[in-house]
Image: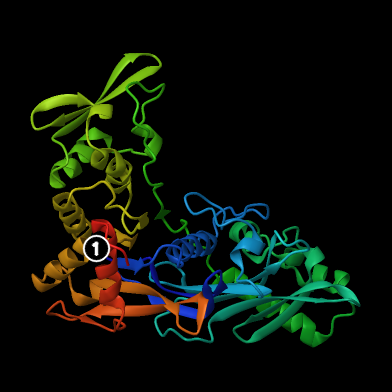
Amino acid sequence: MGVPITDISITNVRTLAGEQCAALSKLTLLVGENSIGKSTFLGSLNALGRLAGLHELTDGTNYFDQEPFNMGNFDSVVRAGCTSFRIAIGLGIGPFRRFAIEFEQDGSATSFKETKLEIQLSSVTADPSQTLTIVRDASEHRPEGWRFSGPAFQFHMNRSEVSDMQFTTWLSRSIARGILPFLGDGTIFRKRADNPTSHDLATFAKFVNFFRHDFRVPETPLRIISPRPYKLKRQRRYPYNPIKTFGNHMGLETINDIGRQLDLFNLIDIRQHSNDEFEVVVDVHGSYHNLCDVGYGIVSLLPLITYIGSSSRDTLFLLQQPEVHVHPSAQAALIKMMAGSKHAFIVETHSDHIITWLRILVKEERLTPTDVTIIYFDQCPEDNTATRLHQIAFDRRANLSGQPNDYREFFEMEAARLLGFST
């Protein structure tokens, strides 16, 4: 299975000071104290992953302020004291190998402006020269321009030649539809440009040729799903079919298969009592109960089960503490199911039990060591407002390597808190 996003680099986003990098695997665990940057990591990855899909983007959408992460506007995303931030991701599938954007504030402290975009194209040779860079070029003495650097060409044009404010919006709308500046016509460019030289005309021709023949917008956006924790409300009757609200297209049979794999339930069924009244009933240990009368574990995992059962191959799931309200045996079954699935998962967790089961699966060779990684979030000793990332790997015997000295201490303190001891 290809991992949709292979790595991420985050620079000056909230507690993530300077450049913080991490490699991602089929199963990536995010571990660390509360309020140290794990949700920021997920929200940043979610935002840039959606932008990298270049699928019908709009200037007015704040992709950082999407549920369940809701990172807010520019001033609440950028690190205090910084005027810009940058996020880059490596891609394992699709036409791009790497996708990076630098953001600055646009006029007010709340809005975003893409000031630099770098896209490395996928190729057999992974030639770094196959990179498109777009930089916003502005000064007090001339209109804002966009400066393009591509394979064997440099091209500059006034931003007024495009109707979009952001680079990604322009690529996702105009370039995706084959609409080039000056309609890709050298004659129109010659008439509208300011006394172009023969060199300018040749550069424009290379620019047009690149976008017509070498640059491909992804055919489908990256499939990233971030189920909201506890999205399904416990109600005796619903004014709609709640299972369909998760986007399920495979029916209850698939959901029930997964539920049995996790040993959560034997069967879930939807009973329609009238045109606008639906009841969710659950068969647990051979008897049916209303959803309100079963454990929180079923309620909390039901949205995830539904999404997994209905999602196409190579979907990336971003999960926040899926172990909450779930019995350790179901946690183990959930990890086994993830290990055998066709998807990739990035999981924020506080459960040592989940890590133990991943080690068991590696030792049993049901996962390879490269299938699993842990990213440990740790407070910088020299700056308690800054977070650093530690990449922890597994070897073939499921031993951990790369963990800092306080990694075990973190879980010991978590256990002490759970038991009510002071820490």
Q: Is residue 63 left or right of residue 339?
A: right
Q: Is residue 83 above or below residue 347?
A: below
Q: Nearer the viewer, residue 395 or 174?
A: 395
Residue occupying the point 46% across, 56% down = 220
Tell me which corner region of the image, top left, top right, bottom left or bottom right, holds residue 169. bottom right
Residue 73 visible here: yes
Task: Determine crowd level at label 1: few under 14, some 14-19, many 20+ residues with C-alpha closer than 10 A.
Answer: some
What is the x, y in percent for residue 117?
61, 73
What is the x, y in percent for residue 345?
32, 61
Tell me which corner region of the image, top left, top right, bottom left or bottom right, holds residue 272. top left
Q: Is residue 346 left or right of residue 372?
A: right
Q: Quadrant of the C terminus?
A: bottom left
Residue 366 visible here: no
Q: Is residue 138 above or below residue 316?
A: below
What is the x, y in percent for residue 298?
24, 39
Name the amino acid type tagged 1. Ala
The residue sitting at the top extreme is: 274
Q: Nearer the viewer, residue 403 or 93?
A: 403
Q: Is residue 264 left or right of residue 138?
A: left
The residue sitting at the front extreme is: 422
Q: Nearer the viewer, residue 84 or 240?
A: 84
Total labels: the figure holds 1
Element type where label 1 sits in the image: helix
What is the x, y in percent for residue 266?
13, 35
Tell me which corner region of the image, top left, top right, bottom left or bottom right, holds residue 195. bottom right
Name the residue that disc number 1 marks.
415
Residue occupying the point 64% across, 53% down = 58
In the rendered view, how is the structure colored? rainbow
Q: Is residue 90 above or below residue 169?
A: below
Q: Quadrant of the N terminus?
A: bottom left
